[in-house]
Image (spheres, rainbow, N blue to C red):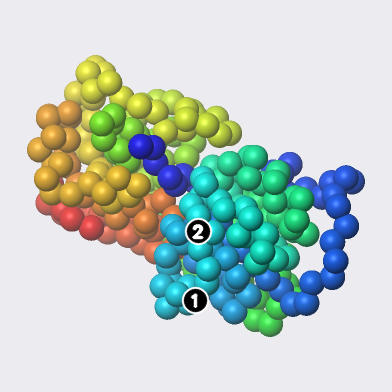
C-alpha cells in the first residue's frame, strides 16, 4: 500500500490550460464545483464556496460539517468518473501529485474547467489563493476571503521567520514496511526548513513521481547522523507503538509524533501549519511528543 497524499506547487500545469480541441459544452445553470484534493476542498470551503460543491473524494473530510451532504466520487487515485459525470460539475479542482494525469485528461471530455493545483513550497499558498480567487472571483465574498487567507498566511510566515532556529537533520517518515520519507523539493520538506529542520536524504524528487517520496532500506549510513525523527499521522498513522522502532532506526535521534495534516495539507491550513511547526520545533519540548 502506498501513500495517497502529497504536495505540489500552486501554479497551473499544462493539464489546466484550455485546448483548441476542447469540446463544446451545453450551458450549465449555476456554479458546480468538484474537488478531488483534500487540501483544495478545505480551502474552497474557507472561500465560502461550500454551497457550490457537488462532489469530493473520500479523503476530503474537512470541514466535516460543510461536507456531510457532498457526494463522494471515489479516492484521489481512483476517481469514479461515471458518477462524477452524472453530477455535471462546471469546475473540477485537481492536483498534480494527488491525482493521476489520465484522470485529469479524462475530465476534459465532460468538464468545462479543470483547475490544476501544484503547491510545492509554503509560499505557493499565496499563488494558490490567487489562482482560486481568479477562478471564482464573480462569487460573493471570494475576493475578500482570498485576501484574508493571504494575509493570515503571510503573518504566520513572518512569525516563523522572526526567530532564529538551530539547524537539525530530520527524517520525516510517512510510511513503514517499507520506510518512506520525503524529498527536499516537497511541500513538507520546504515547510520544515522554515524552522531549520533539513530533511534527509539529500534528494530532489523532481516534478512528480515516486522519487518525491523515497524508500529507505534502513541501513543507510546517514541515519546515524539524524537529530530528529518525525512520525507523521498520515498517510500512515504512526503512533506510540512505533516510537521504539523508529528509535532503533536512528539511535541518536529524538523521536516525535507529529500531525501530518498540519505539516502536509496546504491552502487554508498553511498558516496553522507554520504555527504548529513553531510549537513543535521549540527546543524546550521533550524528546517524544504526540500531536
**Residue 190, picture quadrant:** top left
Question: Mark 1: few, some, or many residues within 10 Å (few <14, many ≥20)?
Answer: few
Quarter of the picture holding the N terminus:
top left
At numbered mark 2, what does the secondary structure look like: helix, strand or loop?
loop
Q: Residue at x 33, y 49 (%)?
A: 234
Position above or below: 149 against 144: above
Asked if one can make out residue 270 in the rendered structure from this viewpoint, the answer is no
**Which tag, 1 or 2, sits closer to the chain's start?**
2
Q: Position of residue 36 (x, y in %)?
A: 56, 56
Q: Secondary structure at mark 1?
A: loop
From the viewer's perspective, tell me whether residue 205 is left or right of residue 216.
right
Quadrant placement of the C terminus: bottom left
Up the image or down, 176 lies above or below 60; here it is above
Name the one closer to the observer, 82 or 203: 82
Q: Residue at x 71, y 55 (%)?
A: 114
Left or right: residue 260 versus residue 90 is left
Residue 16 position, x and y percent, is 72, 49
Residue occupying the point 17% across, 35% down = 246
| Residue 209 locus on image (x, y percent) | 52, 31
Quarter-of-image position of residue 262: bottom left
CA distance for labels 1 and 2: 12 Å
Asked if residue 160 is positioned above or below residue 209 in the image, the reply reads: below
According to the picture, the residue beneath numbered tag 2 turns out to be: 57
Residue with the mark numbered 1: 69
**As drawn, is 150 to the left or to the right of 75?**
right
Q: Nearer the viewer, residue 181 or 150?
A: 181
Q: Tell me which residue sits at (75%, 50%) in the image.
A: 108
Amino acid at each position: 500500500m502506498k501513500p495517497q497524499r502529497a504536495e505540489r506547487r500552486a501554479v497551473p500545469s499544462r493539464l489546466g490550460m484550455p485546448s483548441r480541441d476542447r469540446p463544446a459544452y451545453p450551458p450549465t445553470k449555476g456554479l458546480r464545483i468538484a474537488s478531488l484534493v483534500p487540501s483544495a476542498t478545505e480551502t474552497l470551503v474557507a472561500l465560502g464556496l461550500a454551497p457550490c460543491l457537488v462532489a469530493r473524494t473520500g479523503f476530503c473530510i474537512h470541514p466535516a460539517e460543510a461536507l456531510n451532504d457532498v457526494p463522494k466520487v471515489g479516492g484521489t487515485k481512483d476517481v469514479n468518473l461515471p458518477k462524477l459525470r452524472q453530477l455535471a460539475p462546471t469546475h473540477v479542482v485537481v492536483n498534480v501529485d494527488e491525482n493521476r494525469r489520465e484522470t485529469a485528461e479524462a475530465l476534459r471530455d465532460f468538464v468545462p474547467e479543470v483547475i490544476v493545483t501544484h503547491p510545492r513550497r509554503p509560499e505557493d499558498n499565496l499563488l494558490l489563493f490567487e489562482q482560486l480567487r481568479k477562478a471564482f472571483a464573480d462569487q460573493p465574498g471570494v475576493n475578500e476571503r482570498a485576501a484574508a487567507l493571504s494575509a493570515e498566511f503571510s503573518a504566520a510566515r513572518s512569525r516563523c521567520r522572526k526567530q532564529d532556529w538551530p539547524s537539525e537533520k530530520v527524517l520525516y517518515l510517512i510510511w513503514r514496511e517499507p520506510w518512506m520519507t520525503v524529498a527536499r523539493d516537497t511541500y513538507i520538506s520546504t515547510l520544515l526548513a522554515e524552522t531549520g529542520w533539513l530533511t534527509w536524504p539529500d534528494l530532489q524528487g523532481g516534478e512528480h513521481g515516486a522519487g518525491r517520496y523515497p524508500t529507505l532500506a534502513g541501513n543507510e549510513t546517514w541515519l546515524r547522523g539524524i537529530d530528529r525523527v518525525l512520525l507523521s499521522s498520515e498517510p500512515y498513522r504512526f503512533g506510540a507503538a512505533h516510537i521504539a522502532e523508529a528509535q532503533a532506526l536512528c539511535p541518536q535521534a529524538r523521536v516525535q509524533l507529529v500531525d501530518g495534516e498540519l505539516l502536509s495539507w496546504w491552502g487554508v491550513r498553511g498558516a496553522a501549519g507554520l504555527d504548529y511547526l513553531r510549537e513543535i520545533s521549540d527546543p524546550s519540548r521533550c524528546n517524544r511528543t504526540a500531536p
